[in-house]
Amino acid sequence: MEKPILWIVIPCYNEQEVLPITAPLFRDKVLELVGNGKISEKSRVLFVNDGSSDDTWKIISDLSREDDHYLGISQSRNRGHQNALLAGLMEAKDKCDVTISIDCDGQDDINAMNEMIDRYHEGCEIVYGVRSSRQTDTWFKRTTAQGFYKVMNKMGAETIYNHADYRLVSARVLEHFADFKEVNIFLRGMFPLVGFKSTCVEYERAERIAGESHYPLHKMIKLAIEGITSLSTKPISMITRFGFFCVFLGFIGIIWAIVMVFLNMTVAGWASLACITLFIGGVQLLSLGIIGEYIGKIYLETKQRPRYIISDRTWDEKED
Ligand code: UDP
Ligand code: MG
């Protein structure tokens, strides 16, 4: 069997501090795997610049000029991690046999790639990198992140526990994945839908080598809402069920009120009435908001705008 060509796909947004440190690590990993005879020497490291405002793209172009193992593409503007990764994967799928996506900050243990490639050779087409512990994250990040997965699953957006976007995917799966045309993308929840033989590989997550996280709490909440509303309609059915429950309570209340009138025991319950009105009003607003989220999604989907726009490629530069 011919050795598979591996492309490591790495989204980068304002990563000038960390990129010069981690880029050689990725290249060395490719060289090591080539040396072990597990992958073809045509394997590459592909950086996706997500419209960075710092020197990230300059660093990527310099790297690609100095060493053929590095390639880069640039998005025309910042579109977010998921779109950047999608751009890289779609670019890679025609040029390689298997991809591994990973963040560029060195938090995910690149040594897990050996095991991922082994699993690939055993016939797995998707291998999910799963964090075995979160010792190095702060208590706050750890708890919020774990809450994130729990809420996601409860809401019907099935995701693999503690799996982010460190993942091996074969070009064959990507070929089918390209048929998922939605613009609201949440990759880690979508790959399980493609199917094919898959497995998990555990690794320890380290601290960021340099630079700062781009995923503070508010972005995590946004990602969770994005994930839930683009993968599941469970929140809408929960609203319906809650609505039925409220109607049922109201019905009991009416019966109770009538009985009280007949017993001549009317109470001065203005305060409680006001509370209930407020509560129901709040529930209605929240429900409208959730339904609005879905309508907004439908609106965005009907536009069918491009999911990514690539403005530069390092290999185009070289041909000039
Ligand atoms: N990233 C990106 N576009 C963005 C934000 C982040 O391409 O708008 C990249 C970033 O460069 C990194 C990865 O996505 O490679 C994960 O981001 P980060 O490390 O900041 O998130 P965390 O690991 O803290 O969740
Ligand atoms: Mg990170």
Image (cartoon, rainbow, N blue to C red):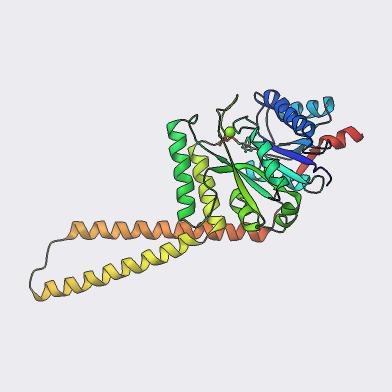
Residue drawn at the location 77% of the way across and 45% of the way down = 91
Q: Is residue 97 left or right of residue 260?
A: right
The x, y position of residue 129, in whole percent, is 60, 41
Point 83% across, 24% down: residue? 66
Residue 139 at x, y percent in the picture: 43, 32
Q: At x 66% / y 57%, what residue is drawn?
A: 194
Which image quadrant is residue 85 in? top right
Foreground residue among 168 and 190: 168
* Closest to the observer, 217 or 196: 196
| Residue depicted at x 51% and y 48% | 224
Of residue 303 and residue 138, the one placed in the foreground of this image is 138
Exactly how many numbered labels are in the figure? 0
Q: Quadrant of ligand 1?
A: top right
> Looking at the image, is 126 positioned above or below residue 52?
below
Which residue is nearer to you in this view: 319 or 27? 27
Residue furthest toward the right? 320
Q: Is residue 234 above or below residue 79?
A: below
Where is residue 303? Give x, y as percent. Answer: 67, 58
Q: Quadrant of the C terminus?
A: top right
Residue 133, image x, y percentages: 50, 36
Q: Is residue 293 visible?
A: yes
